[in-house]
Amino acid sequence: MFFPKKIKSIRPRDRVLEIGPGAAPHPRSNAFLEIVFDTDQLKILQRGGLLKEPDFARRPVYYYDGGKFPFDDKQFDYVICSHVIEHVHDVTGFANEIFRVGGGRGYLEYPLITYEYLYDFGVHLNFVKFDFELNVLRYLPKQETSFSEFAAVTAIFNRMLVSGWGDLWASNKELFFEGVEFNRPFAVEKTGELEKLLPPQSLIVPKRTVRKFLGWIMNKLGL
């Protein structure tokens, strides 16, 4: 999770469900939902290559097959879902399950299309972007685009990421990831327009003088 400070509206007595916590469960979560993976290798791939098992601290963990969540309507008061929705086959159905069990309150986080165009993770099935003005989550399945034509390019950048060169996205997180806290259900809409999935260019700000200077020094030293 890259924007934990965006989670602001959890009340003291709220029962919080977290979906797919990866290796770092949120400290406020009361229960967790994990999908059942066919193999350990697939589980590792879906978790971004992380081998570490999460520490649930004796909090209950539930498992499901990717369909309906194993909970009653409004069983929880808030749902945290960080870096999961880009993995699912049925985005609309998944979102509706979040609303059903959480009463329409929660937090959603995911990579943006800019991140996918650099690194292309095969386990990510969708490009996703929230329209804050219209309260709509838009998505586009990657398989319905010509994205695969760029495989040779993204393979190079992916290798750079694995080798530790993640400076670009690490310094500009809001250009590559998005976090949305919601207090009511929102519409989910499939789109074929890439422009609707892009972050605003206003997020691109000039590099600070100190960072420019440090970068210049590193270049001179060949670091």
Image: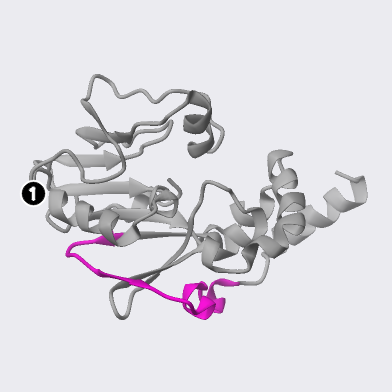
**In magenta segment, residue 48:** no
What residue lies at 41% left-to-right and 35% top-to-bottom?
A: 22
Quadrant in which residue 147 is drawn: bottom right
Specify the quadrant that holds the N terminus.
top left
Helix or strand or loop: what does disc 1 sit on?
Answer: loop
Residue at (17, 38) in percent of width and height: 70
- Note whether 185 is above or below 74 in the view shown: below
Tell me: 120 left or right of 213: left
Query: Quadrant location of residue 134?
Result: bottom left
Q: Bounds of the magenta span?
A: 181-204
Residue 120 placement (x, y as % from top left): 62, 54
Picture coordinates of residue 178, whole percent (x, y):
44, 60
Mark 1 = which residue?
74
- 39 vs 54, nearest the viewer: 39
| Residue at point 29%, 52% (across, down) | 7
Which amino acid is tagged 1? Lys
On the question of residue 97 being in view, the answer is yes
Determine whether 185 is above or below 100 in the image: below
Where, quadrant-wise, is the C terminus in this rendering? Answer: top right
> Who is closer to the viewer here, 193 or 199?
193
Closer to us: 47 or 140 = 140
Q: Is residue 170 left or right of residue 189?
A: right
Of residues 134 and 192, the one drawn nearer to the viewer in this rendering: 192
Q: Is residue 193 magenta?
A: yes
